[in-house]
Amino acid sequence: MTFFFYLAAAVAVISTLFVIFGRNPVHALLNLVVSLLAVAGLFFMLGAPFAGALEVIVYAGAIMVLFVFVVMMLNLGKEIEDQERRWLTPKVWFAPAVLSVLLLGGLLDVLLTGGQTHAAATTTIDAKQVGVHLFGPYLLAVELGSMLLLAALVAAYHLGRHD
Amino acid sequence: MPGYLPPEKRSPLQQLGDILWGVYTQLRTIVMIFSHTFRKRDVIPYPEVKPYMPPRYRGRIVLTRDPDGDERCVACNLCAVACPVGCISLQKTERPEDGRWYPEWFRINFSRCIFCGLCEEACPTTAIQLTPDYELAEYKRQSLVYEKEDLLISGTGKYPDYNFYRVAGMSIEGKPKGAAEKESAPVDIKSLLP
Amino acid sequence: MLDWFNAHPHLVDSLIESVKAIVVLLVTVVVAAWMIWLERRLLGLWQDRYGPNRVGPFGLGQVIADMIKIFFKEDWIPPFVDKLTFIVAPAIAMGLMLLMFALVPVTPTWGVAHINVGLLVFLALAGLEVYAVMLGGWASNSKYSLLGGLRVTAQTVSYEVFMGISLMGIVMLAGSFDLRHIVEYQAANGWNIIPQFFGFCAFVTAAIAVVHRTPFDLPEAESELAAGFHTEYSGMKFGMFFVGEYVGIVLVSAITTVLFFGGWSGPGVESHAWLAFPWFAFKCLCFMSGFILLRASLPRPRYDQMMAAGWKVCLPLSLINLLGTAAVVVAGAHGA
């Protein structure tokens, strides 16, 4: 299990790198999908299958589909790839890379000094427990979130009206 | 249509009715199609079961013989002229012993033939006839060019009693002028008798 | 040898499970291929003709003949396509469909995966399935394929919304996302088709739309889009799309059976355990034939009509179903 965990983690990191350095926008988005799937796999292995499934349904299955849908229609061709090549100069990626390395250092520090294992990593949280928590202690947050979504829905409906 | 309203202008109740009506019609279609499970099939499994072909069906062309067994074709070339696609060709020759005309060779290119039957209509001797045989498929196109020996059959075809030389006025060996059926003897122009 | 097996019971168990998984997947593929024959025969029956009846008994060998033909066809990749995506798309199509079949509990003892949130994983994989067609359409770099890809994306994303919602009624009744629990719940309390009839209607509509099968085959509408997303595909890549579609029908039939018609349960299963699989197979066969009947009888709707049917009819229907089920469940909990 540990091996598969690190495998999925490596897949997530590498595919995210491909997202950043890829020149073809559709390929970059597909790499992002792979990265999200790998993260979902991590959730499954951490004992949170509900979160993992939702990650796939919402991010990979719906949001990224719409991203790809839009990019597909833009008819991006060779010139876009050339443009990407010109834009991706060391001057541009140097500063973000340094910040990322700092973050990675912090992460490695926590990992290597054996940061204490969180309880969530050892027990499986099934859907029922998630539901009980959402409609128990976190009821107010859920209701606020649903109000926000309802408002967005009404607004989208209003904007989409023809007359 | 009088009283028709586009769907978006109809009342919600009417729209609900439309949906239910649509569901009903779709289900009705499904039931109707399902009832075809118990219906007789419209097709036949062809090579095992052959369809009925009426005798006048215009299929493969044959050359027939008269009741005596001689070939009917007199090589008049009318069929070749009548043929709209020009798929018939033949060469006339004469039989030395009795003077009957017959085709030296007779060729029909069935890869051209459109089975219109005009040759059969044009033929004065009912020699060329169309038959109900339609299974003419070949692997090589050249095999569709039928020679006289492929075309000639031993029977009389659709007109069992007709014999051209017995009704026509042409004299041949053994049948002089005036000897044909319903033909009066030739007038002797040198005689004064009525 | 035997000592080794006795010493590693865990390994032996996982070996047996792997063999079971391979058997289930192989059977699925074979059934999907055989389904092509079934479809052609049934379409023939309903159109008053025979269908394939030449190769082997009842034409059963037709599938084998077609397979041999498609294996030997030239696997042509047009020069203008996006090569990697073009090759990956059919593999995604077939692979995800087979992966989804891993979730189906076939009998009490057979079934590949036993996941606590099986229904959610099913929905997740169904959501990913859209990538196959979408990428196939985009990578082909042709206008018909792209239009097919766009259509399938909009269609699948729309219909997946209420496909999930229509299934939540079942989840409430059974109190679990686990497909095995749902089947056991139905074996004890009666099939879900009766309390969840509207959910069933919405789910079947959505499922047909998601596997883009006639009458919802707008992504590959021959009369408008040549062949839609697989216009540029040939040989085995086309074959994978094709078999994937039929695996999709088998899968939808199996899932419908599991969720609404009691899965393997049926008269006599308690006393004779071997009856479980025949019952499951029989129910699946009924649904497969039903989907073929739909194809035989219903014409393809216009695109806006299909979208309107999804958003204005099926979504409200499944939401009302959800609310009603929730009310009944809460009332039952308080009454008891």
Image (cartoon, rainbow, N blue to C red):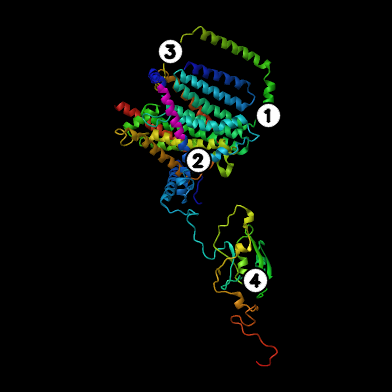
Residue drawn at x 61%, y 28% as measured from the top left: A26
Give the foreground label among 4 and 1. 4
At label 3, counting other C-alpha atoms closer than 10 Å, the crowd grade (few under 14, some 14-19, many 20 or more) is few
Q: CA distance from mark 2 to mark 4?
A: 57 Å
Quarter of the rendering occupied by the C terminus of chain C: top left
Give the foreground label among 4 and 3. 4
Residue drawn at x 65%, y 71% as measured from the top left: B74
Q: CA distance from mark 4 to mark 1?
A: 77 Å
Give the foreground label among 3 and 2. 2
Residue located beneath label 1 in the image: A78
Q: Determine which quarter of the picture holds residue C334.
A: top left
Residue located beneath label 4 in the image: B74
What amino acid is labelled 3 in the image?
Ala
Numbered range of the magenta stretch: C12-28
Residue located beneath label 2 in the image: C64
Q: Position of residue C169 (x, y in %)?
A: 39, 31
At label 1, counting other C-alpha atoms closer than 10 Å, the crowd grade (few under 14, some 14-19, many 20 or more) is few
